Amino acid sequence: MTSPSKNLVVYLYQWLVDFLYGPTRLVSFFKPGPLRERLGFYDPEALRPLASGDNVWLHAASAGEVNALMPLVRALKAARPKAKLILTTSSQTGKKLALEKQAADAVFLAPLDMGRPLRRAFQAFRPSLLLIAETEIWPQWLLRAAQNQVPLLMVNGRVSDKSYPTYRRLRALFAPALCCFNQCLVQTAGDRDKLIALGLPEKRVQVMGQMKYDLKAPGDAAAKAFGEAVGFSGGETLAVLGSLREGELEAWLPELPGLLGRHPKLQLILAPRHIKNAPHYQTLLSEAGIPSRLRSRPAEGPARVLVLDTVGELSLAYHLARVAFVGGTLVPVGGHNVMEPALSGVPVLFGPQTANVAEAVEALLRAGGGFQADNARALAGILESLLDPAASHVAGEKARRAVESLRGATDKNLKAVLDYLPDGL
């Protein structure tokens, strides 16, 4: 694809971020670690297997995007076993999860959107194809791909209601970058319309659905091993409050003592969306008179509340649960993956803020496997009713059917991706 023409705004952006390279490089001498990798200085041993053959570079911003990308990664490996897959993430958490899942032949932190780090990354990775998951519109990165004649696809693409106004205001910067995409394979018609409004030609956008609905539930053995590791004997009733954002635990706190008091066998797992918040959650629980423990530390005494401060175990917790609440829905975030508990046949609770997961919420509500309320008090009442095994089982099977109704996006994305790879791989 011919590189799009640059306007003054793009040149100013490039000048600014490249000017910041010097100070950033200086900081990396004092704090080498992750920053050095983000500047494009990769371990030569890790790069050695990538020196020949065809490499496919996939990028996922963080842990959530890594999880959503996994069905495509597995399908791509099966369809093109000779291709080497390189996965980059913007966060340490995402990188750790990708390594644990053995998601690719090589996993690195993504280069910063600066000229020299990007040049090093493209030289090191030698990509035959670059796949960007969801919406990572980094102007220099995309322009560099077009300049190097590397086919560029957005997979599982989306534009959130929160980020769209910013992209719209800075259209002069983002439109040339978007035009570098050969194809944008997006989740919904709304995502398609937003990208077209931002300047992407209509013929380059296809609606494919969400690949995260194609994920598989954890195996029973893996979930059982997790339960044993955290001290669950199997006789407890487990409820999970997952992907909690700032302010959501505070909303639930007044309801927890009553729930625990009325149900002596009830155990709770609380999973902050950002692991760094786990100690703060413990403090809040302690102030409310609720003993808790961290997953990463040995139990120091009896506690019926576990704060999950590890990566990659939330789906295992959901698999063992009687009922689950998914966060980002009681605060104006837009919601996280409400289908993750449903994969395991677990009924799903969520608040009113569901703009980012509207399709999934509609499917769950329509099927009878999802339950929505405006506040934590109302949600606690629904949760309590679903602690009954029979009610939970019926609602959970309806949630599972809701997931099934939305499957199939991975096959559609894979077919489009394979059009850009040689048949011989």
Image (spheres, helix red, strand yellow):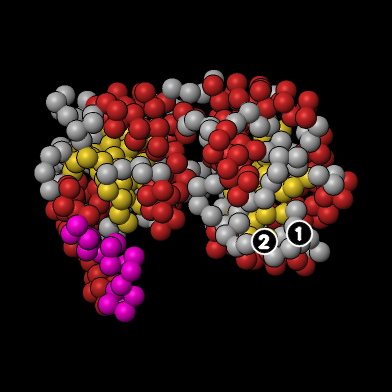
Residue sitting farthest toward the right: 262
The tag on residue 390 is: none
Q: Which percent across, then down, holds residue 61?
A: 39, 50
- x 48%, y 23%: residue: 407
Q: Nearer the viewer, residue 1 or 329?
A: 329
For badge 1, the amino acid type reads Pro
- x 62%, y 66%: residue: 279
Q: Nearer the viewer, residue 298 or 322?
A: 298
Q: Nearer the viewer, residue 381 or 269?
A: 269
Residue 44 in which image quadrant: bottom left
For badge 2, the amino acid type reads Ala
Mark 1 sits on what residue? 302
Mark 2 and 1 residues: CB-CB less than 8 Å, in contact? yes
Residue 44 is one of the magenta-drawn residues: yes
Secondary structure state at the residue bearing disc 2? loop
Q: Main secondary structure of the magenta part?
A: helix
Q: Which percent across, then down, holds residue 103?
A: 35, 42
The tag on residue 299 is: 2
User: Which range of residues does the magenta coloring cover?
Assistant: 27-45
